[in-house]
Image (spheres, rainbow, N blue to C red):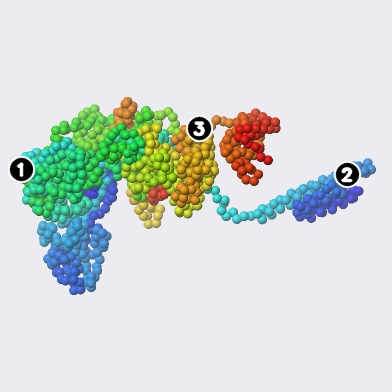
Amino acid sequence: MKVPFHWLGEHVDLAGLDPAEVARLLNLTGTELDRLHHHGVQTPDSVVVGRVLTCEKHPDADRLNVTTVDVGPRAEAPLQIVCGAPNVAAGQVVPVALVGTVMPDGLKIKKAKLRGQRSEGMICSARELGLGDDHAGILSLAEALPDAAAIAPGTPLSDVLPHADDVLEFEITPNRPDCLGIYGIAREVSAAAGATLRPAPWTRAGSPDGAGEEAGDPDPAGGTIEGFSVDVRTDRCPRFTARLFADVVVGPSPLWLQARLAAAGQRAINNVVDVTNYVMLVTGQPLHAFDADRIAGGTLVVREAADGETIDTLDDQTRALRAGELVIDDADGPTSLAAVMGGARSEVHDGTTRVLLEVAAWDGPTVHRTAQRLGLFSEAATRFAKGLAPEQAAWAQVLATRLLVELAGARRVGGTIDEGRWRTAAAPDPIVLRDERVTELLGTAVPGERQAALLTSLGFAVEEAGEGRRHVRVPPERRADVTREIDLIEEIARIGVVADLEPTLPTRRRLTAARLTPAQRARRRAEDALVGRGLQEVAGWSFTDAGAAGRLGLAEDDPRAAAVRLANPLSEDQAVLRPTILVSLLDVARHNRSRGVQDVRIFETGTVFRDQPDPRRPDMPFEHLALAALVQDDVFAAKGLLEAVLGALHVPFGVEATDQIAFLHPGRAAAVRVGDATVGLLGEVHPRVTDRWDLPRAAVFMIDLDQVLPAVPDDVPFHDVGPFPDARFDLAVVVADAVTAARVVDVARAAAGPLAEEVAVFDAYRGTGIEDGHVSLALRVRLRAADRTLTDEEIGGVRAAIVAALETEVGGTLRG
Amino acid sequence: MLDRIDELRTAGEADVASATTTEELEALRVRLLGRKAELPNLLRGVSDLPPQERGAVGKAANQARQALQALIDERIATLADAELDARLVADRVDVTLPGRPEPVGGLHLITRVRREIEDVFLGLGFDVVEGPETETVHYNFDALNHASNHPARDRADTFYLAPSTRLPAVERPGDPDAEDGGSARLLRTHTSPMQIRTMERQDPPVAVIVPGRVYRPDSDATHTPQFHQVEGLWVDVDITLADLKGVLLSFARAIFGDEREIRLRPHFFPFTEPSVEVDVSCFACGGSGIRADQPGHPRCGLCKGTGWIEILGSGLVDPNVLRAVNETRGDDAYDPERVQGFAFGMGIERIAMLRHGVPDLRLLYENDLRVLEQWA
C-alpha cells in the first residue's frame, strides 16, 4: 500500500511528524514499512511557475524553440530556455525546472548550450514531473489550473500543484484490509502517534463545507432509480449499491488528482475511472463504473455462475467460469466478473454521458478463489478477497458522488439502490473484555482507563461494565478481524504494551530435564562419526526431476522409481521429490568434480519420499530419514565408513551380496541387514550410472535412520577386559569362492566358543599357490578369559576346533 | 707383574681417551677386555701364581679391568650422546613443508547452526521433536487457524502434492477448484504442524522446539524452495507474552552475543494472537545503525541503518488452535480459558547467513565443497 505523505496529512494531523517518524511509529505498532521513497522531482522547491515571454525557432534546429521565460524573483532576468516541445508558445504559463533541479529520474538540470544556444533550465512536461504519462508537450498550466494566469512567476509549483511527495510503502497483513485505504492508515497513525484524526471524508463533518452527505444515512431520494433495477440472487453478495449519474463529461482528471494517483502508483485514465480509483485508495473500498446506457435492459442481476459458462472481460479475454463464482448479468447476459474484473461491453468510454456507479460487498473467500484461479489479483480483487464490511459501500458512494459532481460535471439522478441481505444480520453483541485476562496473557497489568483509551483511539466503542469488565463494540471495517476478547487484547498490546514489555522467563513444569532423545543423540553421533572420517556433510535438494529414476536405471515398476509428484513445481527440474538420497549425492559430486575437486568424500542426512502409503500414516506418502555417504573409492571404502557409523552406534549388522539393485555394480553390492530387517544398501555405483553423472567411480552406503536409530542401545553394558593377557594366532584357510568371508568367520567363531574375543578376516589372497576358484582367507583370532591366563593346551584346543569346523562345514583346508 | 698391570691400565686408559667413535671403543673393549686380551688373561692366570702374590695381583688386575670397563662405558655414553646429536642435526627437515594430508570432514553450516539452536533451547527447557515433511492441509493450515482465503494457501506460496493413484483418496474430498487440487496433501510450509501433533499426543505442559526442512515456491538470493525452520511452542497455565520475550531475549543473546537486545514488533500470523515479529539489535553496529569502527562511519549495511535485524515471528497461541487440538483429542485438556502459551518460528538459514555473513542463501544448497569446508 503506497501512501503519499501529504495525502495522509489530509486525514490526520501530522504536525511535528516527518515521514521517517511516521514509518517508525507504525512499524512498532504492526504496520510494517516496506520502503520509504520520494515520488517526483527530488528538489521540488526549484520547480517554479514561469511565463513564456518570447518563443522563436532555433536558428540551427528545426524541432527546437528558443524561449525566454519569466521566473520572477528566481532569476535576475528572464531565462533563456531551449525547448523541444511542439506546443510551447509565448504567453503560456508553464512549470520550469531551474538550474540545479534534480528530476525524478535523477537527471540534474544544468546550464547548457543546445546547438549553440544557451539554455538555463527546462520547461517540463507532465511526465517529466512524475505527474502521469503525458509527454506530448510541455504542461500548459493554463489548461490545468484555474486562474493560472494570476499566479505570480517564480511561485514554487508545489504551492499551486503539489507534485512531489514522500511515499510510505507499507506491507499490509491480510487481516487488515482497512489499511488498504489511506484513511485506515491515518487511523493507525493517530493511535500510534497520539495525533488528531480528522473526520472521515464520507461523514458530514468530514465534507468540505461541513454540510455534506453522511454515509449510512438513508438517501432522501429513495431507493430506486428509474429505468434501472438490481436483483441480488446470492448470499455471497451481502450488499450491492448503485447510483446513477447523468451529464457526465468524460475527460482528463485535474492535475492534483493525477498527481496523487501517480504518487500512489496508479495511472490516470479519465476522470470517471480516476475517481473510482481515488475513492478506493481513500476508503479501501473498490467501486465499479458502468456506462449506464450500455447496461442492456437497465437490469443488473447478481448471481452465482453455472459451471462452464463464459464471459468476456475488460482485458479482451473470454474466460470460462466455475460454479459458485460471482457474475453480474444485464439483459444480454454476463457483463462483469463481479469483484474481480469488469466486462468489456459496459465499460466507461470517451462518449459516456451516464454512469451507473456500483459499490458492493462480496464474500471474501469466493473472490479469493476466483482471483487465484484466473491469476487476476487486481487492486479491487485483492481488497475484496479479504472480505470488506458492507458499511464501507456507503462510504465510497458518498465520496465518489461528491467527486463525480465536482470533477466530471455529473448530476445525480434518482435514489440509491441498496440490495443484499446484510441489513438483516443482527448487530453483533459487544465483546466482553476482562482485566484479568489482559494481565494473564500479556504478563503485565494495563489499567482500565488505558485499555479504553487505546481501543477508542482505534475506533472501538468502549463501555465500562464494572468489576474490571468492559463491553467493546468493533467498528465495521475491523469486524472480520476482531471477533474475540483475545483480538481486543492484541489491539491493546500492539499499541500500548509491546514496546516496553519487561521480559520474564517461564518455569519448566515437566519433571524431566530437557534433552535430546536417544535417537536424536544417535543421529548426531552417526554424523560426527563420518565427519571424524573426513567426510563433508552436504545438503542436497529434496526435489529432483522425473527422469532421475530412469538415470539410476530403475525400472518403472521398481518401488524406488515411484516418486511423489508436485502439483505445482517451480520447474521440471524440481518436479518430484527425491526417491533416494543417492541422486543428491551424485549431483553434488558431479558439481564439485566439474569445479576441480578431485577427491569427493561427502554424506547427507535427509528425508526421501516414495509414492506409496506410509505404514505409520497410511493416507500419506512414505517418507523416511536416510543417511548416505559417497566416496570416490571401492566398495570396501564405503563399507569401512558404514562400519564406522554402525560401530559408533553399537548396532551390529551384516551384509548380503545382491545383484538386484539397478544402480549398483552387480558384483559389488550388498543389502545391509540389522537383525531380520534390510536397513540399507552398500556398494559401488553402477558404471553406467556414474557415467551419466560424469564421475569416474563412486562407492556409497545408504541406510534408513528411521530403522537404525531405534536399534541403537540406550546403554552399552560394561565389559571387563580383565588383567589377563589375550592369546592371538592367525590362520590361513583356503575355501572355494562360493564360501563367503562372513560364513568362514561365523563358522570359526562358533567353533572357538566363549573364549573368542575377536575372529576377523584380515586378508584375502588369490593367485600363485591357490587353486583356481578358491581363495585363501587370513583369519585373526583373539582369545581371552576373564579369570586366568590361557594355557597352551587351551589355545591349541580352540585352534584345532576351528580348523576342524572349517574343514567339515565349509570344506576349508589350512594353507602352508 | 704388578708393573705389567699398571702398564696395561695406563696404555688402555690412553687408548680409550684417544678413541673418537663408539665403534673404536667397542673394538677397544674387545682388544683390552675381551677373551684374548692380556688383562683378563692375567686375571685368569692368578691362580697359577704363588699364593702370597695372588691377592695383590688379583686385586690390581681386577681393579684395572673394572677401571677400564667403566672408562669405556663412560666414554661410549659421552660419544653416543654426541653422535646422536650429530645425527639429529643431519636429520633436520624443513618443518614448514606441508603435513601429510588427512581429510578434515565437517558438518554442513545448516546442521551446525541447527545444533547450536537446539542446544540453546535445550538449556532453556525445551524438548526437541521432529515431524513429517509431507503434510495434510489440515495440519499445515486448518488446525493452525488459517482462514480459507489466507494467501499462504495459494499455489504461489505452497507446494501441493499431485493426486496419487497409489494413495487412498483423502477423507476430505475437497473442492477440485481449491488450491490443493483436491489432494489435500502438501509439503509443509512451516514446522508449525508439529505444534498440533505434539499437543494432540501430549498433555500440557508442553515445551518443545521443532527443527526441520520446510518448503515454499520461492527462489532468489534470500529464498530457496526448501529451507529449514525451528518452531517453538510452550503451553502451560500461565505462559505470557512477557515470557515469550524473556525466552527469545535469552536465545538472541546466546546466538548473537550477550549485549544484544530484542524488540517485539506487532504483526499478524493466523495461529498466534497477539502476534509479534522479533528484531535483534544489530551485532555489526551495536544497534546504532552506523559503523563507528569503519572509516567515514558509514551506514551499517547489515541492518540498513535501522539498528535492528528481523530474526523471527512469534506470538501467543491463538485460542482457535487450542480448540482445534481439543476437538481432535476429544477432551478439553487445552481449554483456552485454562491453558495458554506462546509459539515462535525462525529460519535456520537466516540465522546462519546473519551469523556467518553468507550473502546468498542459494550458496548453502549449491554444496560447493570449497564453500562448505570453510565451516568444517
Q: Amino acid at mark 3?
A: Gly
Q: Is residue A652 above or below residue B93?
A: above
Give A378 or A22, whichever is nearer the viewer: A378
**Which residue matches tag 1?**
A226
**Which residue matches tag 3?**
A675
How far separated are the C-alphas under marks 1 and 3?
87 Å
Residue A627 coordinates in the image, percent (x, y): 46, 40
What is the chain identity of the residue bearing mark 2? B
Q: Label 2 crowding class (10 Å Cα cut-off): few <14, some 14-19, many 20+?
A: few
> In the shown orientation, is residue B287 left or right of residue A808?
left
Q: Amino acid at mark 1?
A: Glu
Residue A213 coordinates in the image, percent (x, y): 10, 43
Give A778 or A144, whichever is nearer the viewer: A778
Residue A775 coordinates in the image, percent (x, y): 61, 41
**Which residue matches tag 2?**
B44
Q: Residue at x 28, y 42 (%)?
A: B154
